Amino acid sequence: MPKVTVHGQEVPCRGILFDKDGTLLDFMPMWGAWATVLIGLLDEHLTTLDKEPMGHRKESLGLFSDQTGRIIGYDKAGPIAMGTEEEVTALLAWHLYAAGIPWNEATVLVRRYNKLAMQKLEQDRRALPLPGLPEFLENCHRSGIKLAVVTSDTVKETEKHLDWMGLSRYFPVVVGRDRVSKGKPDPEMALLAAQKLGLTPQQCIVIGDSNGDMVMGKQASVVCTIGIAPDGDGKQYLLDANWVVRGYHELSVQ
């Protein structure tokens, strides 16, 4: 059986279930740009109504800004990182509602400006794989390890992002929030992905960048969970990970 080595420990496995954003896809180049466009559009609308912009409340969305207001990071345990599109839409609409815009109008505005922000993403295609990921995936492929994506995004969007990164061929199975009745940290995604790979959860590893991924894997009874924390602070939020690594250079396949 193939083995993944992490921190000197060999873990036999036949499959790996990957989260997408922050695990396969470098989060900030794409979603930081998306958030900048979307919040900018919402602020412009609020300004035309002589209402206070919401840009200074980015932290409530799980976004970190520098002194100039530029988005420079995100909370790995926050709504931007872990929430679904519907949940983030509701959170943004709440800010508009708090500014005095009726709820039905607020949700329409968020969806309208989100569509424009997503169109900007389509133009720029800033989807970049994490460093070392393509090599790791190729090694998994050569070793016969089956790969799947389990994500809070939709299957259609996920397949598009994989295509942008040139990684589609590695992932015959993609399970998004639109394929299950319960999202992370419920184990349904992991159980379905393993089944579609023709494996049991006990033959699989989960790799993700949030504790929701780790809890999902643990509840699905996978062989182990590995947290990705490029900033090195993962032990503070990847509480249910069996191992935490900074990146794919700390993992090897045999």
Image (cartoon, rainbow, N blue to C red):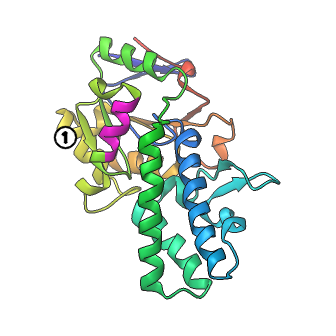
Q: Give the structural element (helix, strand or loop) at label 1.
A: helix
Q: In which quarter of the view is residue 49 placed?
A: bottom right
> On the picture, is 75 further left or further right than 141?
right
Q: Is 162 within the magenta? A: yes
Q: Amino acid at mark 1?
A: Gln
* Residue pictured at 63% horizontal, 33% vertical: 230
Mark 1 sits on what residue?
195
Q: Nearer the viewer, residue 250 or 6?
A: 250
Numbered range of the magenta stretch: 157-164
Q: Is 136 within the magenta? A: no
Q: Residue furthest front?
A: 48
> On the picture, is 13 further left or further right than 8?
left
Q: Residue furthest right?
A: 67
For the residue carrying disc 1, how many other residues have a C-alpha within 10 Å: few (<14), some (14-19), or many (20+)?
few
Query: Percent position (x, y) of residue 79?
Result: 54, 61
Query: Percent position (x, y) of residue 78?
Result: 58, 58
Above or below residue 54? Residue 5 is: above
Quadrant of the frame with the C terminus: top left
Q: Nearer the viewer, residue 110 or 140?
A: 110
Quadrant of the frame with the N terminus: top left
* Residue pictured at 33% horizontal, 52% vertical: 187
* Residue pictured at 30% horizontal, 24% vertical: 170
> On the picture, is 217 further left or further right than 94?
left
Q: Is residue 22 visible?
A: yes
> On the picture, is 242 further left or further right than 141?
right
Query: Percent position (x, y) of residue 55?
Result: 68, 65
Q: In which quarter of the view is residue 114 placed?
A: bottom left
Q: Is residue 17 visible?
A: no
Q: In which quarter of the view is residue 56 placed?
A: bottom right
* Residue pictured at 39% horizontal, 56% vertical: 184
Dominant secondary structure of the magenta stretch? helix
Query: Percent position (x, y) of residue 62?
Result: 62, 59
